[in-house]
Amino acid sequence: MTGQDLAHVLHALAMLRLAPSRDLLAAIDQRFRHVAGDLDAKDVAQIYIAFATMGLHLAEPMKSAIERRAEQVGPSLSAASVAAVLSAYIRLGQKPSSSLLSVLARRAEELAPDMGPEQISGALEAYAQLWGEVSSALLASLSSDPNAVVAAPS
């Protein structure tokens, strides 16, 4: 089973609203450690969405493994994938590592000129909830006026 296969299995379980058994979760966790390095950005986002949809907290060691992979593929995440990862953490009531949050913030800054209003508001809301603040660089990149000066909340 490849990383993409694993992402598809988790997505199917989530869409069918099937709660995986402990045995299945243990098997998924074990397999995940072997294929995590093969996951692309879309697979990573799909796994986050599946866990959030099923309401399953990311537990160690899988949480650390998927965060490491998300950091590695972060520069190739689409705006929708950045939003999906952030949304998953909010829905699960968990907080990503500070290094992953930084990668996601940098990617959101890069993608900001192409984001629509809904994606911008979603990114700001997620950062406010997860980080407790929004960087002035992110705010400036999300501004519709490239010459605007936006201050981060204190």
Image (tube, rainbow, N blue to C red):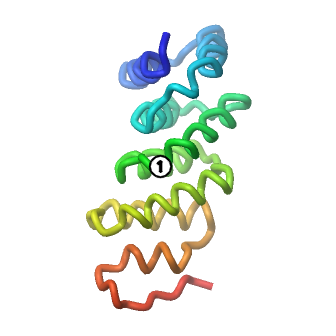
Total number of numbered labels?
1
Q: Relative to the observer, which residue lies in front, 128 or 29? A: 29
Q: What residue sits 51% from the left and 25% below the top?
A: 38
> Quarter of the image containing the C terminus?
bottom right
Q: Is residue 84 visible?
A: yes
Q: Is residue 118 left or right of residue 7?
A: left
Q: What residue sits 62% from the left and 41% below the top?
A: 67
Is the residue 73 above or below the residue 115 in the image?
Answer: above
Q: Quick one: SS at disc 1?
A: helix
Q: Position of residue 113 (x, y in %)?
A: 31, 69
Q: Relative to the observer, which residue lies in front, 114 or 11? A: 114
Is the residue 117 above or below the residue 84 in the image?
Answer: below
Q: Position of residue 42 (x, y in %)?
A: 39, 36
Q: What residue sits 52% from the left and 18% below the top?
A: 19
Q: Quadrant of residue 27?
A: top right
Q: Is residue 18 visible?
A: no
Name, please, the residue furthest toward the right: 60
Q: Looking at numbered disc 1 in the image, what kind of residue is underneath it? A: Ser
Q: What residue sits 40% from the left and 20% below the top?
A: 8
Q: Is residue 21 left or right of residue 46?
A: right
Per the image, the residue denoted by label 1 is 87
